[in-house]
Image (cartoon, coloured by chain):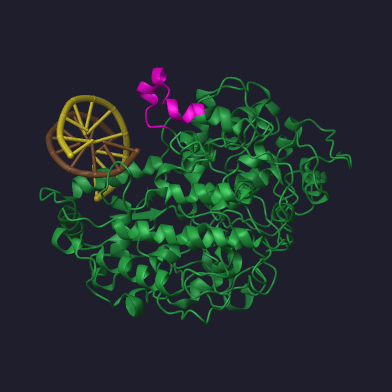
Chain colours: A green, B yellow, C brown
Amino acid sequence: MKTPGDTGFAFPDWAYKPESSPGSRQIQLWHFILELLRKEEYQEVIAWQGDYGEFVIKDPDEVARLWGARKCKPQMNYDKLSRALRYYYNKRILHKTKGKRFTYKFNFNKLVLVNYPFIDMGSARGVPQSAPPVPTGGSHFRFPPSTPSEVLSPSEDLRSPGVFSSVGRRLARGSVSDCSDGTSTNSELEEGVGVEDRGGPGPERAFRGLLHPRLSHDSLFRAYGGPGGLGRPPPGHRVHGDPLSPFPVSPLPGPGGLLGPTLSPALSMTPGSHLPYTPSPSLSPMLGSHFSFNPEDMKRYLQAHHQSVYNYHLSPRAFFHYPNIVVPQPHRPSAAPDKPPAAHHPSHHHAPLMPTHSHSLHHHQGEEHQHPSPFKFKLQPPPLGRKQRDGSASSTGGSTSSMGSSYAASGLLTNSSSAGPPKIKVEPISDMESEEEVEVTDISEEEELLDEEGDVFAPLYPTNGSAPSTVTNGALGAIAEDDLDEDVFKTPAAPPMGPLTPTLLGLKCEPAPPMGPLTPTLQGLKSDLAPPISPGGTLCIPLKLRFKRRWSEDQKMEADGEREDAEDKKVRAEKDEAEPAGREPENGEGLRKSPSLNLGCPPPPAQRRASSELQRATAQLSLENHGAC
DNA sequence: AACGGAATGC
DNA sequence: GCATTCCGTT
């Protein structure tokens, strides 16, 4: 809904709203928080701490004051500010770190996102070179947001002179300021260098290797000026790794990189699990101060390149569909030496990516594939709409509708009631732990599965055949996760998918069950799900079953791995309730798939180009933010 | 401290 | 749509 239909797909609102949303030109609180976090000068006030994405407000009053200044709301106080932060819970932008005062955590997964193809975990690149700084085990965030530069546009980088540097810097700097300050964007320059020191290079690198989003973060982040890095890269010197991006190396081998599309980082991976290193907050993806997503640009971009669409599928959820995508063993290969995984978090969750150990819980899936997925991607359930309450009637129109149409398309889901769009959003979820509990454990039964997941999927995949096309680009898609309900993914115009782009193919993204001609690759992927697929692409097994299996698998994994977002679960639960069966099972969260690097399709030049453009646009947008009070 | 409903403003 | 403000509850 929100997004214009032209392209067909939409991202969650917040995903793109950078600092300002169309309607409101003002900076959003989460952006502001990120700004503060990236500035050294505010370390005493607010700082990254703990898990990836976790930050603590050391001086609530000061933060409130700063925020008030920025918004020209002198009466602002922590109580009010915190209320605003709480609203993010449902949006899944943030969640509270329980037990720690003034500590919140960004859901970068969702935010960022997106599509990272995967990253070869196995390969060298993926390997983290440096240990992750993350001290605390991360609990949930798995994904480092990355930004592969290459992806975007190898050729033209943002970095290129004008764009990046100037933009990045600007962005970086001015933001925090208060009204007076804020307006002036330029103030300190420090950013380039110092700004993100905290994080240190370590994490970034690590990440980079992992993901390679097409548009994703990269674009986003870059725009913002990466962590200190933005400025740095001289135009000429671009390494693949791209300084800006958090990822040290790009996964892609060349420009094209491995995967064209990407997965979404959003998936939640448990930090421990997939990443050898966790991203440190400091480095965090968000380094750039602002994230901005320009919807318009995105759209264009996407439109231009269908691929993007495909990417969408790549998103975690998408993976679901493409079971085949396997990541080459993600075991953290290198990780071992440096960092003992244990370090991360012994705690429950690190879901072991390793296939090897996965419990044998799932028998079902056996056939599906051998590797359970190294990565887990947790699909997130659509965020609940806040309005459950009133919504009863209203149903939060947006969400529902969108889902129905878009998601349904994929066919996967929708068997049952494609017609009626289910409404997903039930309520907000908060991050609770309950999540896990809530989760259904037994997936075994079909129905159950269906119910729960159904919602999720539905949203994800459009029922209509065009599904594949619909997707959005991964990056966003990831983001979208949360909001699926809302409109995250709109159905796109669905480009007729006819020919998949190489990228896609490579990626194996293709989801739609009903697809016509799949490429071998795709088929292969599918096979994952469906055991009995005929070469022709025909699936012998009913979707449902397949899903179930998958679901089961996921669940297991999750169980192990853990709860990522409690919220998600909650959401699901809610959904269930809200929507009874009709949907297909899916797991929003549960699924985690591992993407594999196999894809080898180089992205089409055009695409890249587009991305670069996008990035630029994004950057510009971000610049716009600061207005005076 | 944290949560979240409700009303309200922009 | 995104807070801001108020406020009762946990």
Of residues A593 and A189, the one nearer the viewer is A189
Choose top left, top right, bottom left or bottom right for residue A108.
bottom left
Q: Residue furthest top?
A: A393
Above or below A516: residue A394: above
Above or below A255: residue A471: above
Whether residue A226 is visible to the viewer of this picture, yes or no, is: no
Is residue A85 one of those drawn in magenta? no
- In the picture, measured across the screen, residue A44 lies left or right of residue A328, that is left
In x, y percent, where is residue A321?
69, 43
Residue located 53% across and 49% down the image:
A478
What segment is highlighted magenta in the picture? Answer: A385-401
Whether residue A79 is visible to the viewer of this picture, yes or no, is: yes
Choose top left, top right, bottom left or bottom right for residue A248.
bottom right
- In the picture, measured across the screen, residue A20 lies left or right of residue A281, that is left
- In the picture, measured across the screen, residue A343 lies left or right of residue A125, that is left
Residue located 32% across and 68% down the image:
A172
- In the picture, measured across the screen, residue A234 lies left or right of residue A408, that is left
Residue located 64% across and 60% down the image:
A118
In x, y percent, where is residue A257?
66, 66
Q: Residue furthest left?
A: A74
Report the magenta stretch's main SS. Answer: helix
Is residue A388 one of those drawn in magenta? yes
In x, y percent, where is residue A446?
70, 28
